[in-house]
Amino acid sequence: MEQKRSWHEVVQECQDRVSRLRVVLTTGGAMPPEHKADLDAVILAVRNWIYGRARRLGLDEDARNDVLLEFIQQLHRDLRSPGFGSMERRFGAYVSTTVNRILYERKNRQQNILSFIESLDAPFGDDGPPLHEVIEDPTPARLAEEHDEEQVRKRLYEAIAALPEIERAVVTHRLSEVRGIDIAQMLGMSPANVSRIYKRAINRLRQALTAGESS
């Protein structure tokens, strides 16, 4: 019977495979079959840890599979990003930080949905009907306002996509409420550097958005 490997051994093996993958993927190359086997092996190696982490939080099988899928999608993006070189040396920390962020965001989404539903069912005033029964249909003015908000969000996402790779990585993580110290650990740099990169990115975004307003 095959001896069960320790998490440290699993991480060491994954780091070797990740290093081979990033040599090809960070230069924009296509993934050859042998590297596809490396990627499959990495996912298989961390799957049980991810399932166990999600199970301890009481997530059912469908939810655990959703978490694994989100992790795989993030892993694909980060393997191609030059800004994530630290995952070759600290893959265990990368897995832990990424999965914890996914679980945190998932919990927040569920709480927001529940809060919204509860607010609609709450009575309007003293002993009034539920709020969802008295909400008015949106007016043309409100629809125009929502359209403007959507255009601003679209311009913001486009501006983020145009940022240099490392700035885009920092901003994306900050928008996902990842702490600066955790971003520093993932990217293999100091928290002070992360802070400077973030401020520089914010200045670029501000210039991009204000330029769009003046044109």
Image (cartoon, rainbow, N blue to C red):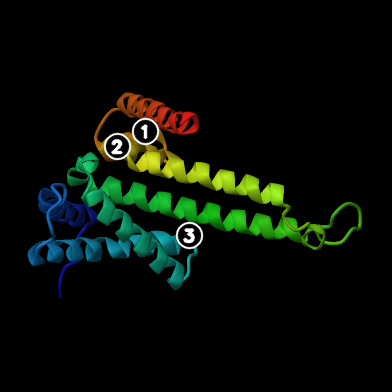
| Quarter of the image with the N terminus in it | bottom left
Establish if 125 lies above or below 173.
below
Residue assigned mark 1: 181
Q: Can you see residue 105?
A: yes
How many marks do you count on the picture? 3
Residue 103: image location, x then y, percent: 45, 54
Please name whichever residue, 10 or 190, is drawn nearer the observer in this view of the structure: 190
Residue 10: image location, x then y, percent: 19, 57
> Label 2 amino acid?
Gln
Residue located 10% across and 49% down the image:
23
Q: Are marks 2 and 1 in contact (CB under 8 Å)?
A: yes
Q: Residue furthest bottom?
A: 1
Q: Residue furthest right?
A: 127
Establish if 173 lies above or below 103.
above
Looking at the image, is mark 1 or mark 3 nearer the viewer?
1
Residue located 13% across and 66% down the image:
37
Residue assigned mark 2: 185
Classify mark 2: helix, strand or loop.
helix
Residue located 41% across and 49% down the image:
101
In-image side of 164 versus 5 (left or right): right
At label 3, counting other C-alpha atoms closer than 10 Å, the crowd grade (few under 14, some 14-19, many 20 or more) is: few
Classify mark 1: helix, strand or loop.
helix
Q: Earlier in the sequence, mark 1 or mark 3?
A: 3
Q: Are marks 1 and 3 in contact (CB under 8 Å)?
A: no
Establish if 124 lies above or below 180.
below
Residue assigned mark 3: 57
Residue 151: image location, x then y, percent: 51, 45
In-image side of 42 versus 53 (left or right): left
At label 1, counting other C-alpha atoms closer than 10 Å, the crowd grade (few under 14, some 14-19, many 20 or more) is: some
